[in-house]
Amino acid sequence: MIDDVNSVHWESKGNYFGKECEIMARQLDGYKFLQYANSDTKFLFSFYRHSLSEIIKKKRTEEEVIRGLLKGTVFSVVLPLSIILGLQKTPISKGVKLARNYTNRNTNWPPCLCINPHTFNRFLINPAENLEMMGFDSRRFEIERYALSEKITVNRKKLKSFPIVKIIERDHSKWIEGFVSEYEKEIKTPEDVGVGNLPIFEEEMERYSMENEEQYNTTHQEAEERGERDEDLPF
């Protein structure tokens, strides 16, 4: 979702109880390029914890999915791109597994950042403590708490109220300065070369959306044939 008035781009992710939440590495590459090209824009990720199992794998009608999420969404955590990149860079901090960077050349599933479900629990319960655990100074972030209005409906059906924790950078421009410097070192592309070799975000996202379900089924089938555990896969 794009909010041009406030210069905010939103990404939404669902997270089932006890399961990791994944973000494709190429998707993060796309967001990093967009952030580099649009320094004034804030990129926020909304994560929704729900109780609807196997949304991709289990066959349901659209109405069943909507009804299940309306009743089963229990909380939401909103994080800025800076924190997501922090999890990618430091998935384990002080002996605590916050996330993992999944990669396996033996499957068709692409590399991705898998965020531990307990990481979201800590953001909900004690976000400042969780930020300090990640190596951030929690004072640089603004932490807001909301309760979703009980008057919201979807397809004329009532959405159950749930708590929301929103974390944003207090000084976005200050973070951007450091981000741009690090990103330019990462891509090692002189300014006059152009952006021909940088990730093409829209094409990557479209391809990811089309291949998502097919890759899920293929990956789990291949893993089963090799005798791998299901928990070793992204989800």
Image: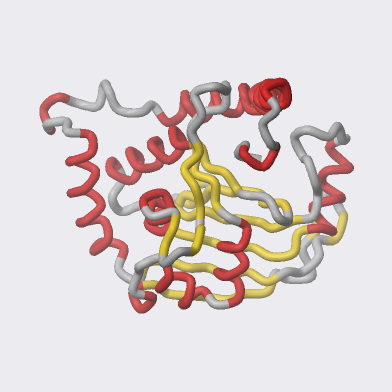
Image coords of residue 59 (percent x, y): 86, 32
Image coords of residue 183 (percent x, y): 24, 43
Question: Could one spot residue 42 in this view of the protein?
Answer: no
Residue at figure coordinates x 85%, y 61% from the top left: 158
Question: Could one spot residue 20 in this view of the protein?
Answer: yes
Q: Nearer the viewer, residue 151 or 17?
A: 17
Query: Left of 9 or right of it: where is 136?
Result: left
Colouring: secondary structure
Q: Is residue 33 above or below residue 221?
A: below
Q: Residue furthest front?
A: 227
Q: Nearer the viewer, residue 11 or 179?
A: 179
Query: Left of 209 or right of it: where is 63?
Result: right
Image coords of residue 218 (percent x, y): 68, 21
- Number of labels in the image equals 0
Residue at figure coordinates x 45%, y 64% from the top left: 95
Q: Is residue 233 above or below residue 121?
A: above
Q: Nearer the viewer, residue 91 or 81?
A: 91
Residue at figure coordinates x 81%, y 65% from the top left: 160
Query: Left of 83 or right of it: where is 216?
Result: right
Indicate the quadrant containing the C terminus: top left, top right, bottom left or bottom right.
top right
Question: Residue 151's image quarter?
Answer: bottom right
Residue at figure coordinates x 14%, y 24% from the top left: 193
Image coords of residue 203 (percent x, y): 47, 24
